[in-house]
Image (cartoon, grey):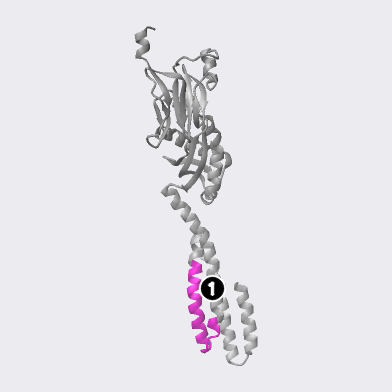
């Protein structure tokens, strides 16, 4: 190299990177037509790491701090270049900075429903979405697996790959564990922890640490959600039928105590039982294909009317009537 070529070269004494905007994961320091002075200062700020790459091979990695670049602080690069211990000439190398800040509020979700086999509903299509956060912890792995020699690599460019990896892991998790859909929907925190645990090795492989992963929603497509609502309604219908029967039984003693003779008892009982029995018959009929069940309350009503009439005529005492009434009502409950 002639004296003119040497004079044309530009030498770097200070190497540092100030992040100009959010969302940058990897940044290549501009080195075209530059060489690094032996003894130059490398400044790595908090939430950063720096990597020296020589002819495509990752050499030395520097944590936060101020570093003087010598053969002692660049042992791997010295070995790659076969420098001796007294090397003090300028040298050429690529320097990459990596942001190790936590990348928060990253969104994941199923672009299309994923099909799972559910224990209760059979094959169903399910959607889910949430947020996660991560950071770079191994810049060498991130460089070799993801960012490479590019001038800059951003969060946005990585987003699609991470989202698809999460969704694929969710599908595998459901297939392996056979978690019922209703359990997933009711235990989203636990589901998020299980997904995070499954994802951590994949993130580690590319130099990342998965900090948090949250499931914000698990749902079925609209047509399947309607079917689920119907099944829930059918389950509630059984409880309503039992409640109606209890309320009907409670209405009988109120009507029987009504002052007004046999006709009054019949009217009071009839009104109370008519309302309750109509509801019970309708509900039970919907559960049994439209066929109403037998009507035991009608028989009790008729018998209570006759007993009340006998009490009014003095054939039965009030105590005898009350005892028989309690016996009959107990059969209905």
SS at mark 1 in the image? helix
Question: Is residue 210 depicted above or below 281 in this figure?
Answer: above
> Is there any visible trace of residue 120 in the rendered image?
no
Q: Which residues are magenta?
A: 254-281
Q: Quadrant of the C terminus?
A: bottom right
Disc 1 packing (10 Å; few <14; some 14–19; many ≥20): some
Image check: 3 left or right of 320? left
Q: Residue at (49%, 82%) from the top-left corner?
A: 267
Q: Residue at (43%, 26%) from the top-left corner?
A: 15
Q: Quadrant of the N terminus?
A: top left
Task: Give the residue furthest to the bottom.
Answer: 314
Image check: 289 left or right of 7? right
Foreground residue, 94 or 251? 94
Residue 87 is a magenta residue? no
Residue 123: x and y, percent? 50, 43
Q: Residue at (47%, 37%) from the top-left corner?
A: 101
Judging by the rendered image, the residue that carries numbered circle 1 is 247
Foreground residue, 275 or 65? 65
> Is there any visible trace of residue 332 in the rendered image?
yes
Secondary structure mostly seen in magenta is: helix
Question: Is residue 158 depicted above or below 109 in this figure?
Answer: above
Figure label count: 1
Residue 155: x and y, percent? 42, 35
Q: Residue at (58%, 81%) from the top-left corner?
A: 303
Residue 277 is a magenta residue? yes
Residue 86: x and y, percent? 53, 14
Foreground residue, 239 or 6? 6
Residue 37: x and y, percent? 44, 19
């Amino acid at each position: 190299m002639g004296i003119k070529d040497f004079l044309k070269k530009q030498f770097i004494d200070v190497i540092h990177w100030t992040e100009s905007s959010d969302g940058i994961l990897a940044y290549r320091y501009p080195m075209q037509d530059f060489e690094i002075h032996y003894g130059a200062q490398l400044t790595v700020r908090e939430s950063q790491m720096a990597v020296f790459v020589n002819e495509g091979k990752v050499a030395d990695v520097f944590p936060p701090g101020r570093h003087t670049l010598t053969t002692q602080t660049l042992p791997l690069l010295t070995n790659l270049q076969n420098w001796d211990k007294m090397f003090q000439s300028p040298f050429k190398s690529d320097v990459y900075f990596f942001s190790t800040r936590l990348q928060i509020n990253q969104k994941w979700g199923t672009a299309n429903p994923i099909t799972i086999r559910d224990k209760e509903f059979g094959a169903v299509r399910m959607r889910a979405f949430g947020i996660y956060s991560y950071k770079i912890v191994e810049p060498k792995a991130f460089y070799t697996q993801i960012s490479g020699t590019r001038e800059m690599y951003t969060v946005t460019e990585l987003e699609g790959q991470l989202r698809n990896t999460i969704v694929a892991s969710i599908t595998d998790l459901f297939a392996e564990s056979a978690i019922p859909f209703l359990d997933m929907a009711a235990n989203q925190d636990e589901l998020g922890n299980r997904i995070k645990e499954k994802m951590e090795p994949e993130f580690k492989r590319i130099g990342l640490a998965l900090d948090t992963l949250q499931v914000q929603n698990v749902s079925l497509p609209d047509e399947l959600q309607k079917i689920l609502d119907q099944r829930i309604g059918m389950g509630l219908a059984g409880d309503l039928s039992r409640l109606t029967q209890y309320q009907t039984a409670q209405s009988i003693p109120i009507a029987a105590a009504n002052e007004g003779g046999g006709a009054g008892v019949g009217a009071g009982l009839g009104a109370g039982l008519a309302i309750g029995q109509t509801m019970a018959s309708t509900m039970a009929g919907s559960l049994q294909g439209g066929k109403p069940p037998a009507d035991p309350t009608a028989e009790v009503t008729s018998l209570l009317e006759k007993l009340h009439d006998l009490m009014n005529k003095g054939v039965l005492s009030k105590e005898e009537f009350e005892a028989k009434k309690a016996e009959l009502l107990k059969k209905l409950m």
